[in-house]
């Protein structure tokens, strides 16, 4: 069990490192070589497409993972999901083709959405293969499927940058090629190693049953998709592409910094499904896991703030560093809340508390939308970051109120203490020392010392964590 968990975590982490590394290359090359208006339009097109395809999943993706992990017939589940993505994907692109009338004033944006959408449609078609593979806990194979597009796109853009050929047309071509090749590679690997035939099956009764089982997740998907990119869409359509370019740069770096969470999260659903099915879940063990996650999350946010000003302005030639200092600070405060919410969401999901999850995201979405509508016109990008922070905080409070049996109010206290330790450490070190690098090193030292003092890190944590992983 320990070796399997270590292999799964290692494979998933390697995949994430590769994806984030090439994703960083892609994002950096685009941000440096395109003017802010063009860069903003590319990000706006991606925001529209990613939101749309997330909604088109209808929440079936997470249900498929749970069903396969639970032992349901993987072939039957796969064929139904393949039918769903082909049906909804083709329907969406058909609508996109006849939507030109809505982009009369912005033909360049419509062209970007239409063409980049071809690649995203190919990625959407590959989703069933990846979700079934994840449900089977074949994370090494899944990792091979997930890295293809970013490697192709990253390598292609690096070559274009070296040849000084970065342009919108070449960027579109590279994006379509990377996404299409990932679909082809996923089909090949799935057939070779999973050995389950890949085809669509129309079975009215079974399909409606799958939709009914996913129905509580549909609302969650609608809300989370809008929540994830509503601020981008609002800034891009209502403020300007230039401001979106600045905000999307800060937000993308923030997303990349959530690498540890991205490594852990896919492993939690199948593991917690089996844990709660067997009845071996212990509140003390869950508390330890979430406390360690919070320590990692806050430390990541601390490093993000320490490295921002000395590094980003140099890398982007002054375009995206200082202008985003306040934005990245606010977003970094969301880091521990994201870890906290993901942990509690996973526990609730595997317990089929889907109605409660829907309510949590509904409330969160409402807070975020109202915050964006009120704060973005006044504070621009910082307003969007504040709205996102408030939404994450409200969601955490809601989860705590609905998970009292596990004592997660104590975990929320740990969240506050860890965040407070980081804030005190960074501000005190910068107050005492003018040199940024010296202040940064001391901030890290102060942070871990304060964690020991407040007992957020304990001497016996390592042994307890090993016991949990071995169980």
Image (cartoon, grey):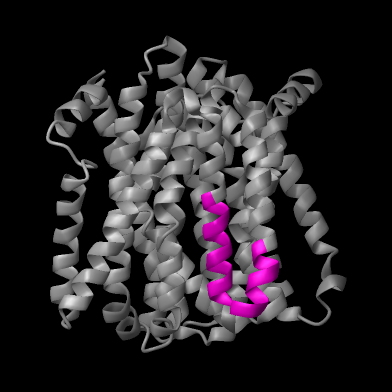
Query: Magenta stretch containing residue 230, yes or no?
Result: no
Magenta stretch, main secondary structure, is helix
Among the 4 quarters of the image, the one containing residue 50: bottom right
101 vs 128: above or below? below
Instruction: Report the quarter where the N terminus lies.
Output: top left
Residue at point 64%, 79% (across, down) = 378
Q: Which residues are magenta?
A: 371-393
164 vs 10: above or below? below
**Quick check: 266 left or right of 44?**
left
Q: Position of residue 127 (x, y in %)?
A: 57, 41
Number of labelled discs? 0
75 vs 54: above or below? above
Residue at point 54%, 85% (across, down) = 36
**Quick check: 471 left or right of 217?**
left
Q: Position of residue 383 (x, y in %)?
A: 58, 72
Residue at point 61%, 51% (across, down) = 122
Q: Position of residue 336 (x, y in %)?
A: 39, 50
Instruction: Report the quarter where the C terminus lies.
Output: top left
Query: Magenta stretch containing residue 376, yes or no?
Result: yes
Q: Position of residue 366 (x, y in %)?
A: 69, 53
- Residue at the top extreme? 278
Among the 4 quarters of the image, the one containing residue 316: bottom left
């Amino acid at each position: 069990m320990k070796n399997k968990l270590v292999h799964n975590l290692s494979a998933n982490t390697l995949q994430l490192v590769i994806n984030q590394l090439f994703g960083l290359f892609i994002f950096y090359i685009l941000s440096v070589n395109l003017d802010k208006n063009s860069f903003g339009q590319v990000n706006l097109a991606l925001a529209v497409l990613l939101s749309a395809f997330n909604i088109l999943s209808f929440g079936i993706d997470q249900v498929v993972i749970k069903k396969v992990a639970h032992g349901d017939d993987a072939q039957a589940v796969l064929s139904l999901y393949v039918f769903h993505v082909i049906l909804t994907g083709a329907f969406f692109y058909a609508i996109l083709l006849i939507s030109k009338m809505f982009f009369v004033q912005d033909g360049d944006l419509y062209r970007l959405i239409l063409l980049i959408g071809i690649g995203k449609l190919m990625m959407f078609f590959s989703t069933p293969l990846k979700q079934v593979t994840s449900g089977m806990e074949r994370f090494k194979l899944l990792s091979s499927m997930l890295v293809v597009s970013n490697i192709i796109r990253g390598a292609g853009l690096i070559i274009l940058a070296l040849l000084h050929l970065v342009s919108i047309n070449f960027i579109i071509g590279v994006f379509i090629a990377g996404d299409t090749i990932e679909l082809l590679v996923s089909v090949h690997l799935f057939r070779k190693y999973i050995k389950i035939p890949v085809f669509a099956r129309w079975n009215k009764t079974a399909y409606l049953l799958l939709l009914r089982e996913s129905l509580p997740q549909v609302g969650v998907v609608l809300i989370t998709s809008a929540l994830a990119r509503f601020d981008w869409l609002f800034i891009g359509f209502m403020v300007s592409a230039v401001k979106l370019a600045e905000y999307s740069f800060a937000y993308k770096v923030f997303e990349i910094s959530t690498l540890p969470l991205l490594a852990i999260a896919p492993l939690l659903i199948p593991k917690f499904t089996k844990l709660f099915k067997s009845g071996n879940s212990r509140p003390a063990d869950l508390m330890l896991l979430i406390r360690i996650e919070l320590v990692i999350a806050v430390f990541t946010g601390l490093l993000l703030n320490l490295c921002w000003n000395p590094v980003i302005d140099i890398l982007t030639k002054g375009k995206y560093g200082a202008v985003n200092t306040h934005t990245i600070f606010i977003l970094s405060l969301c880091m521990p809340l994201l870890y906290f919410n993901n942990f509690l969401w996973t526990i609730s999901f595997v317990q089929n508390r889907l109605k409660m999850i829907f309510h949590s995201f509904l409330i969160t979405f409402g807070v975020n939308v109202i915050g964006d509508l009120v704060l973005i016109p006044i504070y621009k990008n910082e307003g969007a970051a504040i709205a996102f922070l408030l939404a994450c905080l409200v969601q955490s409070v809601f989860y705590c109120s609905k998970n009292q049996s596990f004592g997660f109010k104590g975990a929320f206290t740990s969240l506050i203490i860890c965040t407070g330790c980081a804030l005190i450490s960074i501000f005190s070190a910068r107050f005492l020392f003018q040199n940024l690098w010296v202040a940064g090193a001391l901030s890290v030292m102060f942070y871990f010392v304060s964690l020991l003092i407040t007992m957020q890190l304990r001497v016996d944590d390592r042994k307890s964590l090993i016991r949990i992983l071995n169980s």
